[in-house]
Image: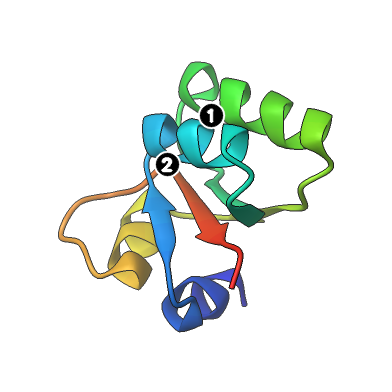
Amino acid sequence: MSYEKVKQATKTFVGTKQAVKAIKAGQVKEIVVAQDAEERITQPVIALAQEKGIPISFVESRKDLGKACGIQVGAAVVAIAVD
């Protein structure tokens, strides 16, 4: 289900650094996190999203999350931009 949300999103921020920047700039309405990603990579984004009250969804696979974004590599974190 969250893969579909990512595919349908008009704009996304892929990766931890991009997601953190976008959250701080107030441009994010939801975060999608891959459960098979390393916690040390995803934890800063999750903590910031919780602090800002942004909903967090979890998906199983980094590989599939990357595919949903249209990239050839896995993605640990994807932020969905505010429309």
Quadrant housing the N terminus: bottom right
User: Residue at image x 43%, y 78%?
Assistant: 7
User: Residue at image x 43%, y 61%?
Assistant: 12
- The percent position of residue 66, horizontal first and vertical second, equals 31, 58
Q: Which residue is mark 1?
A: 42
Q: Earlier in the sequence, mark 1 or mark 2?
A: 1
Q: Is residue 27 above or below residue 17?
A: below
Q: Which residue is mark 2?
A: 76
Horizontal placement of 56 versus 75: left or right?
right
Horizontal placement of 38 versus 25: left or right?
left
Q: Is residue 51 above or below residue 33?
A: above
- The amino acid marked with disc number 1 is Thr
Q: Is residue 49 above or below residue 39?
A: below
Query: What separation in Å lies between label 1 and label 2 (alpha carbons)?
Result: 7 Å
| Viewer-proximal residue among 66 and 14 | 14
User: Residue at image x 60%, y 39%?
Assistant: 23
Provide the secondary structure element on which disc 1 rests.
helix
Circles 1 and 2: CB distance less than 8 Å? Answer: yes
- The percent position of residue 75, horizontal first and vertical second, equals 35, 47
